[in-house]
Amino acid sequence: NSLQGERLPLMSSSAVGGACASPGCDKVVSQRLACPKCMQMGLPPTYFCGQDCFKNNYKSHKSIHALAQQIQAAQQSQVATGGHRKTPPNGVVCDADAAPEVRLQLPTWAQPYEFSGRLRPTLLSPKRSVPARVPKPDYANDRGGVSNSEQHDRASNTAIRVFSSKELDGEYGLRHACRMGREVLDVAGKALRPGVTTDEIDRIVHEACMERGVYPSPLNYYNFPKSVCTSVNEVICHGIPDYRELQEGDICNVDITTYNKGGYHGDLNETFFIGKVDEDGERLVKTAFDCLAAALAMVKPGTLYRDLGTTIQKLATANKCSVVRTYCGHGIGSLFHTAPNVPHYHKNKAKGIMKVGHVFTVEPMINLGSPNDKTWGDNWTAVTTDGKRSSQFEHTVLVTPNGCELLTARDNEPVMTWDHDLLQR
């Protein structure tokens, strides 16, 4: 085994000028010499100070290769047996009554993973069940969590749906689904505090949905394993609830979507302060709130969907923040995700003009540092590449003749109004 000179344009923390990867070696890496096996397997490059150090440490180092091979084999097995590319890997679940040292250990996929920030995942609780009486979307019982109705829509849809008053206002219409989502988010938000696990928030959300006879839309959507997304600190979106306890100074986004008996989804989220949060965290969360409010103020018949991004990015930049480009708002209704796409950044190429009866989400993800993202090895959790924090707010909105209606608004708050105390936990 010998080292290869790596020619990647990006340097990891262990590249030139960093520390050698050999345990106990205090030499500085002076050349970009990386383990060839790691590179071949697509793992983050591991750098050594020289050939001798690499050879002396190889017996220990190659255990990373064996572990990575196990993870890759498990992922391939899941796909072969009907799983989806976003199916979380094996080795991530344990019972809630397991010993703390078991619950809090890193999942198998995370042991060789190079994290961008301080947050670390733990194991997950088993998947929660949904009784037969609760209506389910088409992906709820699909082995791969695939929504065939969404797949068909992507292949054939050429227009943005216009909702009728009957579809909106029926007993189990779209307005009802959004109201259920708001109720569930309010219940979940009240439970947040330092020391509570995000798994406990998932339990609360799941039970609140069952009590209301609605399905938690994230559950099994392309094999997402939980009923809510909880995104803490550097997590941008799609955080999977686990046994980690929320800590003083964290920020935590709770993203709720509910599916009702009428076959409609309602989607919203908010970011909360857990205990005392520093000034940068306060600025970030307020900026994310203001970005959404400014975008929603533009929603009316005749507005181009692409124009929301310019307003959002201008406000974020003025507050020394950045806008995530990978994820966007979306149409919603009978489908969890459909046309239109609603990007949140300047000079996007979104198609479409707002018309009365359009329903969609706006959900800008705002970062303290770089706008770039990457996805953890659980295939879902999107994080900032520089490990700095991210915040988000979201509403489902209806275009009306004179502007818009927030279908997921707080009680007695038809227009978004900043109130720090409502988000403080």
Image (cartoon, helix red, strand yellow):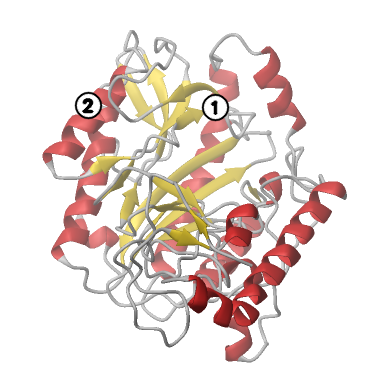
Residue visible at 38% across and 52% down in the picture: 385
Q: What is the quadrant of residue 41 in the picture?
A: bottom right
Number of numbered discs overlaid on the protein picture: 2
Q: Is residue 18 left or right of residue 88?
A: left
Rendering coords of residue 111 (x, y %): 58, 73
Helix, strand, or loop for circle 2? helix
Q: Earlier in the sequence, mark 2 or mark 1?
A: 1
Amino acid carrying label 1: it is Asp
Quadrant including the C terminus? bottom left
Q: What is the quadrant of residue 250 in the picture?
A: bottom left
Spatial CA span between label 2 and label 1: 31 Å
Residue visible at 77% across and 37% down in the picture: 138
Rendering coords of residue 368 (x, y %): 24, 51
Q: Is residue 166 above or below residue 89?
A: above
Between 317 and 109, the one lying in front of the other is: 109
Amino acid carrying label 2: it is Thr
Rendering coords of residue 207 (x, y %): 62, 64
Circle 1 residue: 169
Helix, strand, or loop for circle 1? helix
